[in-house]
Image: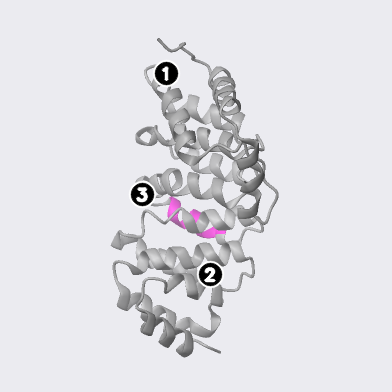
């Protein structure tokens, strides 16, 4: 019988203890090669992190509310280790049916404070949590458009990857293309790559629309963004688009 834990502090301590118990220093040292910014890691694999988060959730699911999960994020997001942030994000995502509208502002505060200060943490957290908020509270879509102009790179990236799971829905496509277009002047490669990723996802449902968008804005599109966006086109079409969108 697993030990019952209740407070956010208890869960944070238990989660960190579980991560330390299975930490792999050699893997931790290798993680840095995937990031340009400095990161810290326990060297725990993604499947193992998900198992830890699932086990913790099983212990608290009968007692906790969404507010408790937010408190856990307040405790673990400031931690430097990628896996600590991921556990909190995964547990909060379990409460998506109960997300209050006010969580939107809380997420922005975490991003502005650089608590999610790498592409992996932003990409784990935002598609599920922010995607749910945007779908449930449509007026938040106008607010997240303002994030595209924010000086913080993680707020900017969040404005993009929050729409990844919404890209298959027709009602979001105009907004997605608008947001992607607004990021074309940005020189940050983490923004350019995320932008191309979102364009690729929205283009899965309407390749003709994506192609026309790329041809219309071609010279303004960073080549990194363009290459990501056209990955699912046939090779001959990719070559054509690369040529036709040159300055």
In the rendered structure, which disc, 3 or 2, sits on the residue that comes first in sequence? 3
**How packed is label 3: few (under 14 Cα within 10 Å), some, or many (20 or more)?**
some
The alpha-carbon separation of the residues under discs 1 and 2 comes to: 44 Å
Q: Position of residue 205 (x, y in %)?
A: 29, 67
Position of residue 144 relative to residue 208, above or below, is above
In percent of the image, x 55 and y 36: which residue is there? 44
Q: Position of residue 47 (x, y in %)?
A: 44, 38
In the rendered structure, which disc, 3 or 1, sits on the residue that comes first in sequence? 1
The answer to whether any part of residue 115 appears in the image is no
Q: Quadrant of the C terminus?
A: bottom right
> Which residue, given by chain and number where applicable, does mark 3 sit on?
135
The magenta segment is 140-147
> Which residue, given by chain and number where applicable, does mark 1 sit on?
59
Quarter-of-image position of residue 75: top right
Residue 182 tag number: 2
In percent of the image, x 53 and y 78: which residue is there? 221
Q: Is mark 1 on a helix, strand or loop?
A: helix
In percent of the image, x 52 and y 88: which residue is there? 246
Q: Is mark 3 on a helix, strand or loop?
A: helix
Q: Where is residue 149 in the image (x, y as percent from the top left)?
A: 60, 62
Q: Position of residue 59 (x, y in %)?
A: 42, 18
The alpha-carbon separation of the residues under discs 3 and 1 comes to: 29 Å
Q: Is residue 73 left or right of residue 162?
A: right
Quarter-of-image position of residue 211: bottom left
The answer to whether any part of residue 184 appears in the image is yes
Q: In terms of secondary structure, what is the magenta stretch mainly?
A: helix
Q: Which is more toward the observer, 58 or 198?
A: 58
Q: In which quarter of the image is the N terminus?
A: top left
Q: What element carries label 2?
A: helix
**How packed is label 1: few (under 14 Cα within 10 Å), some, or many (20 or more)?**
some
């Amino acid at each position: 019988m697993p030990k019952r834990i209740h407070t956010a502090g208890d869960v944070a301590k238990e989660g960190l203890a579980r991560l330390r118990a299975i930490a792999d220093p050699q893997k931790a040292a290798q993680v840095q090669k995937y990031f340009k910014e400095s990161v810290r890691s326990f060297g725990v694999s993604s499947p193992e992190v998900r198992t830890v988060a699932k086990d913790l959730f099983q212990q608290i699911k009968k007692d906790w509310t969404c507010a408790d999960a937010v408190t856990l994020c307040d405790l673990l997001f400031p931690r430097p280790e990628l896996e600590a942030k991921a556990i909190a994000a995964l547990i909060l995502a379990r409460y998506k049916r109960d997300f209050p509208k006010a969580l939107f502002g809380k997420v922005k505060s975490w991003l502005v404070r650089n608590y999610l200060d790498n592409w992996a943490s932003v990409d784990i957290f935002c598609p599920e949590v922010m995607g749910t908020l945007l779908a449930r509270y449509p007026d938040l879509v106008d607010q997240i458009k303002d994030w595209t102009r924010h000086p913080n790179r993680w707020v900017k990236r969040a404005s993009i990857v929050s729409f990844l799971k919404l890209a298959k829905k027709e009602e979001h496509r105009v907004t997605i293309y608008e947001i992607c277009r607004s990021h074309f002047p940005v020189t940050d490669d983490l923004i350019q790559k995320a932008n191309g990723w979102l364009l690729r996802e929205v283009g899965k449902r309407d390749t003709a629309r994506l192609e026309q968008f790329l041809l219309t804005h071609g010279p303004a599109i960073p080549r990194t963004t363009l290459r990501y966006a056209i990955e699912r086109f046939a090779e001959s079409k990719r070559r054509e688009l690369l040529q036709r969108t040159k300055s």
